């Protein structure tokens, strides 16, 4: 059995490229203005799970698309989401807005959940269910506070 999901690994690498470029151009980093330790802990647990389970297949869990057609849907859907994510990074690189924050948190959230569902991989689905609402909420709250609109 193969323990590496090469498609998921490539998706994570591509998703990280704009984040790494942004971190290089903005060395001050992300400032967390909205403090909620419980939500932050769940977000990090979910994030680690999503990144890990996109790449690593645990042998005691079922993983895999059911047919060649399902694999094509998996690749096309993830490709569209990934391209959209990168495109929004490009057009909104230096703009801090609710649109950017929501788009750049919702798109990977949908990607993780959809990948888990299409591959039938329960650990990824559970990780996405934990990560998604926490990540979106933290991103939204921080952007609202930073932009000064309460």
Image: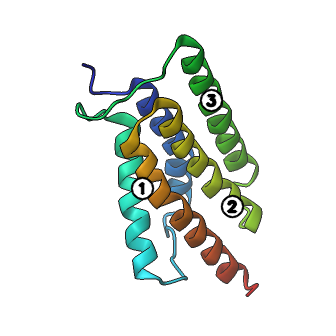
> What percent of the width, then of the height, locates residue 31?
51, 75
Q: Is residue 88 above or below residue 148?
A: above
First in residue order: circle 2 vs circle 1:
1
Circle 2 packing at 10 Å, graded few (<14), some (14-19), many (20+), is: some
Residue 3, given in percent of the width and then of the height, sits at 27, 27
Residue found 40% across the figure and 36% down from its top? 121
| Pointer 3 with pointer 2, Cβ within 8 A | no
Residue 5 appears left or right of 25: left
Q: Residues within 10 Å of mark 1 (few under 14, many from 20)?
A: many
Tell whether 140 sits left or right of 138. Answer: right
Closer to the chain start, of discs 3 and 2, is: 3
Q: Which mark is residue 79?
A: 3
List the residue tagged with mark 1: 47
Observer-nearest residue: 13 or 75?
Answer: 75
Give the alpha-carbon distance from disc 3 to disc 2, as whole Å: 19 Å
User: What secondary structure is marked by label 3?
Assistant: helix
Residue that appears at 54% across and 82% down: 34
- The residue at which mark 2 appears reads as 102
Quick one: 119 or 53, which is closer to the camera?
A: 119
């Amino acid at each position: 059995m193969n323990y590496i999901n090469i498609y998921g690994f490539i998706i994570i690498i591509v998703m990280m490229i704009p984040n790494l470029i942004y971190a290089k151009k903005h060395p001050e980093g992300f400032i967390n203005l909205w403090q909620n330790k419980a939500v932050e802990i769940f977000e990090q647990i979910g994030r680690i799970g999503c990144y890990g389970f996109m790449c690593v297949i645990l042998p005691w869990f079922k993983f895999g698309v059911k047919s060649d057609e399902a694999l094509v849907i998996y690749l096309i859907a993830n490709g569209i989401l990934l391209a959209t994510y990168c495109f929004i990074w490009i057009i909104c690189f230096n703009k801090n807005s609710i649109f950017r924050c929501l788009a750049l948190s919702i798109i990977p959230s949908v990607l993780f959940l959809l990948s888990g569902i299409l591959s039938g991989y329960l650990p990824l689905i559970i990780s996405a269910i934990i990560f998604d609402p926490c990540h979106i909420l933290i991103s939204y709250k921080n952007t609202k506070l930073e932009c000064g609109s309460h």
